[in-house]
Amino acid sequence: MINVFRKFLRELTTNRISQIAVTINLLVLIYLYWERQERTGRPFHYQYESPLFKVIYQLDLPAIWITSYVTYPLNFVGDASNDYWWLGTIGVSVLVFFTSLQWGLVGYFMWKIYIAVLGKTKGEDLSKKTTEVI
């Protein structure tokens, strides 16, 4: 079981489509963070956010749900005292981890579908098959 999990993690982290999806998502998250810096301190209102933020929010919703369940106990401690302001940083870190995992899985399964459609086996040249399919 552990070897299967290791193989899956190796395929997930070395897959180019997964790496591209995670990188694009992280760059967009950084851009949206900088965009929201000018409105620091204002509450979150979905209808007033930028269209890019709305799209990313919808696409990252599964990761946001998982993060809300994982970091639920931190909300009580962080709200109880201003001494624990750093708990918000942990919550954001967990959110970035789960969104990266989500987009890594999306890229991995896109690659698996691509291989299944083209019928590629190890060592076979994909360039010949892509010209035949098109």
Image: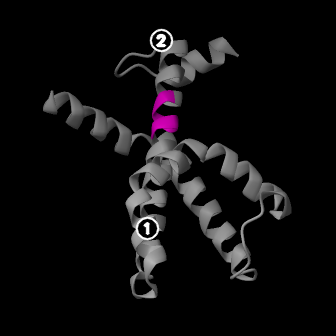
**Which residue, given by chain and number where applicable, does mark 2 sit on?**
119
Check if residue 113 falls in the magenta segment.
no
Q: In the image as oriented, which residue stretches furthest toward the front?
A: 80
Q: Position of residue 7 (x, y in %)?
A: 24, 33
Task: Work out whether 134 lies above or below 20.
Answer: above
Q: Position of residue 43 (x, y in %)?
A: 72, 72
Q: Nearer the viewer, residue 14 or 46?
A: 46
Classify 10 Å Cα crowding around label 2: few (below 14), some (14-19), many (20 and above).
few
Provide the secondary structure element on which disc 1 rests.
Answer: helix
Q: Nearer the viewer, residue 48 or 20?
A: 48
Q: Which quadrant is home to the C terminus? A: top right
Q: Amino acid at mark 2?
A: Gly
Q: Is residue 33 left or right of residue 104?
A: right
Q: Quadrant of residue 38?
A: bottom right
Q: Position of residue 111 (x, y in %)?
A: 49, 29
Q: Position of residue 117 (x, y in %)?
A: 55, 13
Provide the secondary structure element on which disc 2 rests.
Answer: loop
Task: Work out whether 80 lies above or below 128.
Answer: below
Q: Nearer the viewer, residue 124 or 39?
A: 39
Residue at 44% across / 16% down in the picture? Answer: 120
Q: Is residue 49 left or right of residue 105?
A: right
- Give the magenta-colored segment's residue range: 105-109
Classify 10 Å Cα crowding around label 1: few (below 14), some (14-19), many (20 and above).
few
**Which residue, given by chain and number where applicable, does mark 1 sit on?**
76
Q: Nearer the viewer, residue 124 or 112?
A: 112
